[in-house]
Amino acid sequence: MGVERTELFGAEAEPYECGLSEELRRVARTELREDDGSRAHALQQMRDWIAKHPHIRKCRTDSLFLLRFLRTKKFSVPMAQEMLERYLAIRQLYPHWFKNLDVMDPKISDILDAGYLIPLPERDDFGRRVLFSCAGRFDPYKFSSADMARTHSLVVEAIMDDEQNQVCGYSYVNDEAGLTAGHVSLWSLSDIRKMIRCLQDSTPMRHKATHFLNVPSLANKLFEFFTMLLNDKLRNRIMLHTSVKDLHENINPKILPKEYGGTIPMAEMIANFKKELVAKRAALQALDDMEIELHPKARYVSDMQEELAGLAGSFRKLEVD
């Protein structure tokens, strides 16, 4: 494992070969301002910046990793650099959410086996990878919010290097049937706020559409609070569905688990994805080798602290039934 971990941080020497089809290259050029010249120039700028950064101690500099940020920020190098700083910082500010991502961890393994979260093997009609979650399959009395967060982190880290995912983005289907007061009480309002800031500003993913199914009335106020914290772009990409039939009008049913109208049973999807996680285990654990100094005056630290200041009043206004 030690050799594999070392190789992960020396991959920048390998020449980049674009893994996109001609159609996806056109999408990247139209939507992300990416072509061979802009990509090569931006990658070199990112590597030079990392090498000279006063606080970054260790970071992946291979092309697939850096392209996560460049494609998310449509090849604005300064914005990609800022997101990378924040990505490295949140991993150290909140290690209980973003570190120790191991499919062999008994808690994470059990959560995955239960069917709480799975990337669907087939893409939606827009070429996006779909992350499918079922709240009722997560046991809030056996697992903590940190266990939930690490499971999400493991799953997304395993798929973020995929170039089609980087270009086309992601959509989400969240079945909230079975959501109970136990689930709601797992997360403090402060932690919800922190997590949403992490997802919006520090995670290199193009969030394209979010579908919620079967949201129970007990979660209405929490859901309102959650959506209030999202930026306008993400808030406008949320769709609520009252039935699976309604969901099928927006998501091709053939890509869903068999239990939701598709053809492949969820258990089979889970087993295949866990094999993928095992194959990537060393690379995923090596992410913990990355390090940035959390300098108190640095923007990526001070911004997070300022965003979380003065929130007590907002929390007091919210009453969760």
Image (cartoon, rainbow, N blue to C red):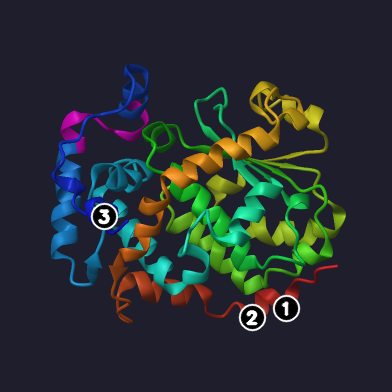
Q: Amino acid at mark 3?
A: Arg
The residue positioned 83% from the left and 65% from the top of the image is 181
- Foreground mark, 3 or 2, reads 3
Q: Is residue 71 above or below residue 97?
A: above
- Which type of secondary structure does the marked residue at label 2 adopt? helix
The residue positioned 52% from the left and 38% from the top of the image is 170
The residue to which callout 3 is attached is 60
How many neighbours does mark 1 have within 10 angstroms: few (below 14), some (14-19), or many (20 or more)?
few
- Which image quarter is the C terminus in? bottom right
Q: Which of these two is toward me, 118 or 201?
A: 118
> Residue 57 vs residue 214: left or right?
left
Q: Is residue 188 above or below residue 179?
A: below
The residue to which callout 1 is attached is 316
- Foreground mark, 3 or 1, reads 3
Is there any visible trace of residue 116 in the rendered image? Answer: no
- Which image quarter is the N terminus in? bottom left
Q: Amino acid at mark 2?
A: Ala
The residue positioned 46% from the left and 64% from the top of the image is 100
> Which residues lie in the magenta part?
30-39
- Image location (x, y in percent) of residue 86: 37, 63
Helix, strand or loop: magenta stretch: helix
